[in-house]
Amino acid sequence: MPSDNLDLMRLEAFGGVALVGVATAADAALARAVEAVNRTVAEFDQACSRFRSDSELSALNAAWGRAVSVGPVLLEAVSASLRAARLTAGDVDPTVGDALIALGYDRDFAALASADDAADPTPFPPRPIAAIPGWRTVVVDDDAGTVRLAPGVTLDVGATAKALAADRAATRAFDAAGCGVLVSFSGDLAIAGPPPAGGWRVRVTDDHRAGVDAPGQWISLQSGGLATSSTAVRRWRTNSGVAHHLIDPATGQPANSVWRTASVTARSCLDANIASTAAIIRGARAVGWLEGLGLPTRLVRVDGTVRHLAGWPSESDDLPGSAESVVGADRGASGA
Amino acid sequence: MSFGSERSRAAAVRDAALERVRRTRRWVIVATAALSAGFAALVASVAPGHSLASKSSSEQAGVATTASSTGSTGSAVPSMPAPASPGELGLQGPDQAPSPAPSQGSSSQAQAPAPAPAAPAVVSGGS
């Protein structure tokens, strides 16, 4: 039975909220899209989860230097994570798994002592770790379908795999539903097929679980992908302070960035995710890099001011512009 | 007289031998060039675009590779490399930058004479 408004289906996937939307009011199309998305989530979870003892990734991490035959999903996910490392000169590195475990992130996030839960009496005692092994210690053989990690290396492909899954799920759902589709995994969006009139309306905020009333900005997207990385979420307490999940490979510690949140649009959700994660790690250096790549970006400083780069609209943002934005606007106005 | 005749015969023998050496050298040079050209043509037709330095396996540390499979044209003209896959390219910008959208309360439905179904709102944030 068609309804007057387009609808979204809300699911749980990859430890966060997943949304599936179709650009038609037909309920059957949404059901077919959701089925395709669920299938993709199951495949990626079985292949890439660091928290499942029966996943392919867990077997690979336990192989201690042996080449391991992996399925096409993990093979693609590992290759995508290595591409991310190559394109960011190692700032987005999948070999930070051991650093995350050392900081206590060795189980599903819901089981950790949240930084927001001050009453939790059991903050994690972090252990020191050696340097990040680096992505060049990972060898992929496409022909043989194998991946080999240097002994002691623990892969974490979580962020790039989730974005890759969003791209794959959106394409599958589009094929199944026969209409435009939007898929969101924990706030990382992929769009396939023609959008609804006016585009897909997106509220960009610090936390994907926040409602549409949270401080942020409304934008409209027609195609491609959008990803947001933030140090304001997925934080937990340790004996040495609050940790978050975005690890700087140069230090092995949570990134101490000038940005608390970075949102990027790109041709795919995967590319957007790579850029948004790198933006947090790179800090102030990210501005020129993102502008050079022409990736529309919204950056929120830790003080709550915001910068819009490379074509990201600055209208109707709840947050005040940063000093650089104001100077840039003045310069643009005087030059016009 | 006899001594002079001996000398001229020795000179003639030497000249003939030198001529044979020159002729043989010319033939060796011509044959070497012809064999080289033939071998090059054979290799170019059998394995175009390959070099001795290339790896037989696509195994490479940290980099996924794609095989070039453009096929041979049967001539010695080197074939063009295969187009780069999206995985080999750099980060790609969107076809269209995001545009400002009206807030939740100010739906475009109210302004349109023949309203289309309203797109639902999605939240993008850190996870």
Image: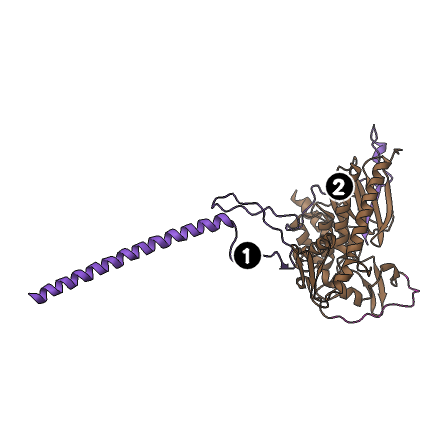
Chain colours: A brown, B purple
What residue is shown at x 80% (from left), y 45% (from top)?
A183
Residue A294 visible: yes
In the rendered image, residue B70, in percent from the top left (x then y), is placed at: 57, 45
In the rendered image, residue A174, in percent from the top left (x then y), is placed at: 77, 40
In the rendered image, residue B40, in percent from the top left (x then y), is placed at: 44, 51
Dominant SS type (magenta): loop
Which amino acid type is marked by label 2?
A: Ala
Residue A249 or B61: which is nearer the viewer? B61
- Do tag 1 and tag 2 residues touch (Cβ < 8 Å)? no
Q: Residues within 10 Å of mark 2 (few under 14, many from 20)?
A: many
Q: Which image quadrant: the C terminus of chain A?
A: top right
In the rendered image, residue A235, in percent from the top left (x then y), is placed at: 83, 61
| Cα–Cα gap, marks 1 and 2 | 38 Å
Give the secondary structure at mark 1. Answer: loop
Which residue, given by chain and number where applicable, does mark 2 sit on?
A192
Residue A204 visible: no
Say whether residue B57 is magenta: no
Q: Is residue A101 left or right of residue B33?
A: right
**In the image, farthest residue toward the top:** B113
**In the image, farthest residue toward the right:** A119
Q: Is residue A283 above or below residue B101?
A: below
Residue A192 or B79: which is nearer the viewer? B79
Q: Residues within 10 Å of mark 1 (few under 14, many from 20)?
A: few
Which mark is in front, 1 or 2? 1
What residue is shown at x 77% (from left), y 43% (from top)?
A172
Say whether residue A124 is magenta: yes
| Chain letter belonging to callout 2 | A
What residue is shown at x 26% (from left), y 57% (from top)?
B22
Which range of residues does the magenta coloring cover? A117-129
State the mark number for residue B54: 1
Which amino acid type is marked by label 1?
A: Ser
